[in-house]
Image: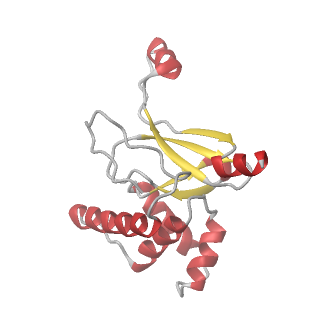
Amino acid sequence: MTSGTRAGDATPPDPVGFEKHDHAGCIDAALAAAEARCNENGLRFTPVRREALDILLQEHRALGAYEMLDRLRDAGFGSQPPVAYRALEFLVANGFAHKIERLNAFVACSHLGSDHAPAFMICRLCQSVAEACSTRAKGGLGEAARAAGFRIERTTIEAVGVCPACAEGADA
């Protein structure tokens, strides 16, 4: 997990997910950042919300709501679907997680604290997900929006391909 950049910084953070990094440190830093942001904004970072974020942080792949529900149940948080859906809704609404529409699943935000438009690289073989930052109104989409008089407020890019680890395995 990278610390990310703050809104207005010129350089977006590097993509996270496929490279080797201190994963335990990544999880600890993200949980601490989420807790601090909740405290700053008067949000309740309840035990179930914290556990849901911790579960998403354990792997760099997206989890569906029912897999999240199973893991929350195993952690002692009940087995009713609203438990998972409410926790995931809170995490997404507050920028701690993103929904990967293609997979109908959720992934922890790798750039917590930065104002960014997420771009996801999804491995079609192992389902790992790396998040990078894109820009909201640049390139062809931005040009088309400006030509149409449309103001882009939010974008998400999802690209499907093969991650470095799977590509290496295929080459071996």
Q: Residue at x 42, y 73 (%)?
A: 50
How is the structure coloured here?
Answer: secondary structure
Q: Position of residue 71 (x, y in %)?
A: 60, 77
Q: Quadrant of the N terminus?
A: bottom left
Q: Is 48 situated above or below 115?
A: below
Q: Position of residue 18 (x, y in %)?
A: 56, 51
Left or right: where 4 falls relative to 127:
left
Q: Position of residue 59 (x, y in %)?
A: 56, 64
Which quadrant holds residue 35? bottom left
Q: How many circles with numbers are drawn on the protein? A: 0
Work out which residue is located at the far left of the displayed protein and give it: 40
Work out which residue is located at the far bottom of the displayed protein and give it: 76
Left or right: where 141 falls relative to 14:
right
Q: Is 113 situated above or below 40?
A: above
Q: Residue at x 60, y 58 (%)?
A: 62
Q: Position of residue 111 (x, y in %)?
A: 39, 50
Q: Residue at x 38, y 76 (%)?
A: 46
Work out which residue is located at the far front of the displayed protein and give it: 172
In depth, the one of 64 and 162 nearer the eye is: 162
In depth, the one of 95 and 16 nearer the eye is: 16
Work out which residue is located at the far top of the displayed protein and give it: 147
